[in-house]
Image: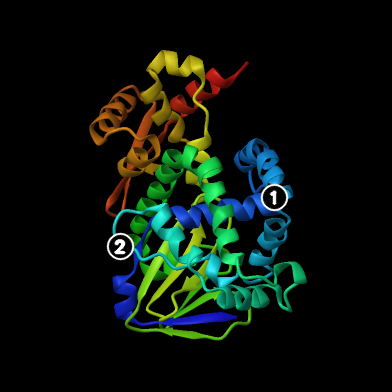
Amino acid sequence: MSMWRIDTDTLAGSRFVVSPLAETVAALKSLARDRPEHPGERAWLDTHLPAYRARQAADPIAARLVPAVFGGNWNADFITPTPTGEGAPDFAAELAPIRATAPERARADLVVSLGGPLPPLLDRDDLAQRAADVLEWVWHRTVLPDWPRRRRIIEADIVARTGQLSRGGWAAALSALRPGMRWLGDSMLRVNAHDYPSKHLSGVRLLLVPVTLRCGWVSWDDDAERYAVVYPCSGALADADRARVPDSLARLLGPARAAVLVLLATPKSTTQLVALTGQGLGSVGRHLKILLDSGLASRRRVGRSVLYFRTEAGDALVSAQRTP
């Protein structure tokens, strides 16, 4: 098992960050594997796979490079640089280190991810630039047009995880991040089930990076000063944002209020609803008050948070509007 010993100061200084590059790498992994994890991903793949396949077919080197980069149990390190966690997230700035990767470093990383020697087609000096070109294409063609929605899901997940941390501590927050990850106590975190050397994280920055697709990985920078855990957003949050608001319900309640009611299929805080809907805090608050007053929603306090959810009447109304 891969184990990290994380000291108290590192845990206390850890933070959640948004990374457009991590989201794009996750999107490329999904395109490369063509195995949707949920219906929403299937629809996204159906939309973008034809253009992606055409692009790769026109570039045989990139077509061989992408599966080599993701290898088996280990990604080529140069394709997953650790976020800095500083400033506003910017895709171009995050992509720059990949494009600047030295040829010998890219080849060495690919040997590790492949678990063997490079095929002759990939024994070349422009591997990092070609990988960056593919990621730039994926960002502009498949992620950027949908980035506002994806970012709302990511921010809602950060809100949820932060609340979980405040209620249950690091054991609850880290154990729930991704399959196989468990906080074992005594400063020990089991990162995954693979047999990799243990690491001691002391005096470093630990970054937690959500992505909307069902994949994840870990990374650290060359100086071992920053570590990152990339993990999939909560399924309940990601699926909630895909929930369609019936036209009849939107006409009855108004589209903004109807969207809030649909999202309350599972309990959510006001902050989560703001992140998921893109509406302002005041607007969400007014919608919730009307839904509470009308008996369509209720609320309960969980620790420091107040969670809102649909009542039986709210469920019945939404179900009725979806009935053909």
Q: Is residue 208 above or below residue 45?
A: below
Q: Residue furthest front?
A: 125
Could you tell me residue 155's position as x and y percent? 38, 48
- Other-residue count near label 2 (Cα within 10 Å), few / some / many at <14 / 14–19 / ≥20: few
Point out residue 170 in the picture as x, y percentages from the top left corner: 38, 69
Residue 308, picture quadrant? top left
Residue sitting at the far left: 282
At 46% from the left edge and 59% from the top edge, which residue is drawn?
A: 95
Amino acid type, label 1: Gln
**Amino acid type, mark 2:** Glu
The residue located at (63%, 75%) in the rendering is: 107
Left or right: 13, with 182 as reference point:
left
Give the residue furthest to the right: 120
Residue under the point 52% across and 33% down:
243
**In front: mark 1 or mark 2?**
1
Say which residue appears at 52% left-offset and 36% top-offset: 242
Q: Quadrant of the N terminus?
A: bottom right
Q: Is residue 128 above or below residue 56?
A: below
Please state if 312 lies on the left or on the right of 206 as rendered.
right
Q: Which residue bears the numbered disc 2?
A: 86
Secondary structure of the residue carrying tag 2 is: loop
Q: Nearer the viewer, residue 258 or 48?
A: 48
Mark 1: secondary structure:
helix
Total tally of numbered discs in the picture: 2
Residue 303 visible in the shown view: yes
Q: In the rendering, which numbered label is found on residue 99?
A: none
The residue at which mark 1 appears reads as: 56
Kindly tell me whether residue 176 is visible in this rendering.
Answer: no
**Which of marks 2 and 1 precedes in the sequence?**
1
Quadrant containing the C terminus in the rendered view: top right
Residue 190 horizontal/vertical position (percent): 52, 76
